[in-house]
Amino acid sequence: MTRRADAAPERWLRKTGRGLYCAPGDFYIDPSRTAARAVITHGHSDHARAGHDAVLTTAATAAIMRARYGAESAGAYDCALYGETRRFGDVAVRLLPAGHVLGSAQVVIEHAGCRVVVSGDYKRRRDPTCAGFEPIDCDLFITEATFALPVFRHPDDRGEIAKLLHSLAVFPDRCHLVGVYALGKAQRVIALLRESGWDRPIYLHGALIELCALYESLGVALGDLRPVSGERKKAMAGEIVLCPPGALNDRWSRGFPDPVTAMASGWMRVRQRARMGGIELPLILSDHADWDELIRTIHDMGAPRLWVTHGREEALVHYARSKGVEAEALSLVGFEEEGG
């Protein structure tokens, strides 16, 4: 791309009460409230909300939104393949893989000779359940910053899964309850377990069943998955049971044989957070980029300007400025940690 020295995306892309708004194309990106036209980066509920009149997204994200919000989750969906261009007036928009969860996308916006990339949530490491992040040269890179502190350096995924399998070998008479987010983390943990040789059934809390079935319908093989409830809990010694994080310490978790409580999240890097949650086996597995991946991505995108949307903005802005990048924090509200 030939970069324009006078590129000024702030003239046509701005922060509003709903989120990022592209004025010449008349669309919002991951708006926090209903909009006439929305471009949705992925299916987590802090980015994908129901009720928009028209939605541009990937087919997988549209399927996830329908599963979570119902068939009438949006007035109309325009499902684009990665790399396909859509035009809204003088604005060209295309979606590229973000590597966050199945269907997740970066939004590439081109207008008046300027290219802007909005990352949505992303990670840079391999994930067997979704397409990997693709860097692209741009004038302005708009990035998340969920784990934008140097303390957040995620270990190798295979090592974290090995910790879980080792615990199963050491404690064969105990059930292993693993807290996972319903979208993305559950399916990734299952796929990583399969790659590590665990071919036994994996048991699921009822809240995880629908999205796992959806992943399989979209071509992501997860193996033998079974629901667990009632009397079956007593037979779960030596088994892996996945559940939402909120179920680890509620009434549902009673009845399992001496459970080892585990949690798969990037936040497990913070020991106090694990202790406060009563987590015996913290597994540092995140669907977001860690500090090193964020820094790598800033360099890979090659943008002279950086906007940071949500998370630990200050450290990333400081780093970027130290490298000569014109950086600022947008501090967008409404984005939580469903995919941590």
Image (spheres, helix red, strand yellow):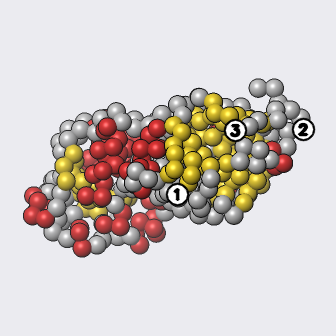
Q: Who comes first in sequence, dot 2 or dot 1?
A: 2
Q: Where in the figure is residue 174, as x and y percent of width and height?
A: 17, 59
Side of 32 relative to 193 (left or right): right
Q: Who comes first in sequence, dot 3 or dot 1?
A: 1
Label drawn at residue 290: none
**In the figure, 9 relative to 80: above or below?**
below
Query: What's the amino acid at mark 1?
Result: Gly
**Circle 1 is placed at which residue position?**
51
Q: Where in the figure is residue 270, as x and y percent of width and height?
A: 49, 63
| Neighbour tally class for label 3: few under 14, some 14-19, many 20 plus, Cα within 10 Å | few
Q: Who comes first in sequence, dot 2 or dot 3?
A: 2
Between 113 and 158, the residue placed more toward the observer is 113
Q: Residue at x 51, y 37 (%)?
A: 79
Query: What's the amino acid at mark 2?
Result: Asp
Q: Please, what secondary structure does the residue beneath circle 3 have? A: strand
Q: Nearer the viewer, mark 2 or mark 1?
A: 1
Label drawn at residue 6: 2
Q: Where in the figure is residue 120, as x and y percent of width and height?
A: 59, 47
- Alpha-carbon distance for marks 3 and 1? 20 Å
**In the figure, 254 relative to 301: above or below?**
below
**In the figure, 110 relative to 204: above or below?**
above
* Any part of residue 142 in sight: yes
* Residue 96 image-quadrant placement: top right
| Neighbour tally class for label 2: few under 14, some 14-19, many 20 plus, Cα within 10 Å | few
Q: Residue at x 24, y 54 (%)?
A: 204
Q: Please, what secondary structure does the residue beneath circle 1 have? A: loop
- Alpha-carbon distance for marks 2 and 3? 23 Å
* Quadrant of image for the N terminus: top right
**Circle 3 is placed at which residue position?**
88
* Residue 157 image-quadrant placement: top left
Q: Residue at x 35, y 70 (%)?
A: 278
* Any part of residue 170 in sight: no
